[in-house]
Amino acid sequence: MEQMTGLLFLSFSSLILLSFSGSVDAYKNYTVGDSLGWYDTTVKSNVNYQKWADGKNFSLGDFLIFNTDNNHSVVQTYNFTTYKLCDYDNSVDNVTVEWSSANPSNTLTQGVTVAVPLLKEGPTYFFSGDYDGEQCDNGQHFKLTVSHGKGLPDSLKDPSDQAPAPNAADYDSTPDTTVPFDLNNPHDQDTDVKKDSGSISLYGKFLDMKLHGILLLLGIVYLF
């Protein structure tokens, strides 16, 4: 009951918002059955809801207005099997909504107006699921196809669809890895080579000095 009340509140609120919006011309309200309302053939013998729906161009954001009473329900489903069986009580999926429930035990019949927004493209089905589907079997049903049209107005969009996408997870930045030397120009390796080259050079100079000293001494001896 709380879910149904919430859906009805959303429907009427959205209908009011659309009535005052600048884009109201983009959306339409269809009164189901026109002046006959939403009843089975035991109450209104000349109703033909499928004939009423055929030829109309239904679009996202349009509303269906059901004028009925508390002894007739309004059920919407996207499941063809549920529709063919006229069975709301045993529907096992989450694509069937009872917008208005009937109360057969209530001896006081009261008028009810139910506003149902068209929220999904493609085929959708409506029926009364009361009295074990008897009202549905007695003509209280129809199907229609919803086109994209102008698309859903913001007032009818699911808030979760309008929420901004979550930010990507923040990861700690990886510290730069210190490379001991440039793999293409290994300066550190050259340093060791230069040290070795310097040692060899000094040793060579030392030998050269010793050789010059020996030759000088031999020259002196030769003179005397």
Image (spheres, helix red, strand yellow):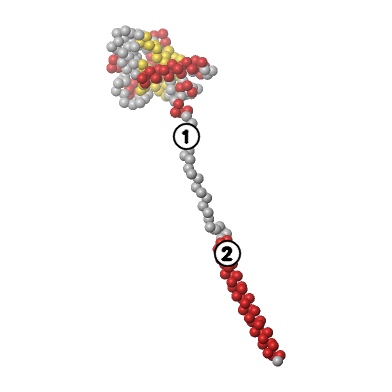
Figure quadrant of residue 191 = bottom right
Q: Position of residue 13 (x, y in %)?
A: 45, 17
Q: Which residue is mark 1?
A: 166
Q: Earlier in the sequence, mark 1 or mark 2?
A: 1
Looking at the picture, does residue 204 appear above or below residue 38?
A: below
**Which of pointers 1 and 2 indicates the residue nearer the eye?**
2
> Which quarter of the rendering shows the C terminus?
bottom right
Q: Are marks 1 and 2 in contact (CB under 8 Å)?
A: no
Disc 1 residue type (three-letter): Pro
Q: Quadrant of the N terminus?
A: top left
Of residues 154 and 144, which is closer to you in this image? 154
Coordinates of residue 198 in the picture (x, y in percent):
60, 70
Residue farthest to the right, as pictured? 223
Residue placed most toward the observer, 86 or 197? 197
Q: Amino acid at mark 2?
A: Thr
Q: Is residue 173 visible?
A: yes
Residue under label 2: 191
For mark 1, does the 10 Å Cα neighbourhood hold few (<14), some (14 to 19), or many (20 or more) residues? few
Q: Is residue 147 left or right of residue 90?
A: right
Q: Residue at x 32, y 20 (%)?
A: 88
Residue 84 location, quadrant: top left
* Count of numbered circles on the image: 2
- Secondary structure of residue under mark 1: loop
Q: Residue at x 46, y 20 (%)?
A: 61
Asked if residue 126 can be seen in this view, the reply is no
Is residue 202 shown left or right of residue 104?
right
Residue drawn 48% across the image and 40% down it: 170
Q: Residues within 10 Å of mark 2 (few under 14, many from 20)?
A: few
From the top left corner, tell me how far across and down residue 91 is, in percent. Answer: 31, 24
Q: Nearer the viewer, residue 47 or 14?
A: 14
How far is the residue under mark 1 from the one under mark 2?
53 Å
As helix, strand or loop, the secondary structure at mark 2 comes to: helix
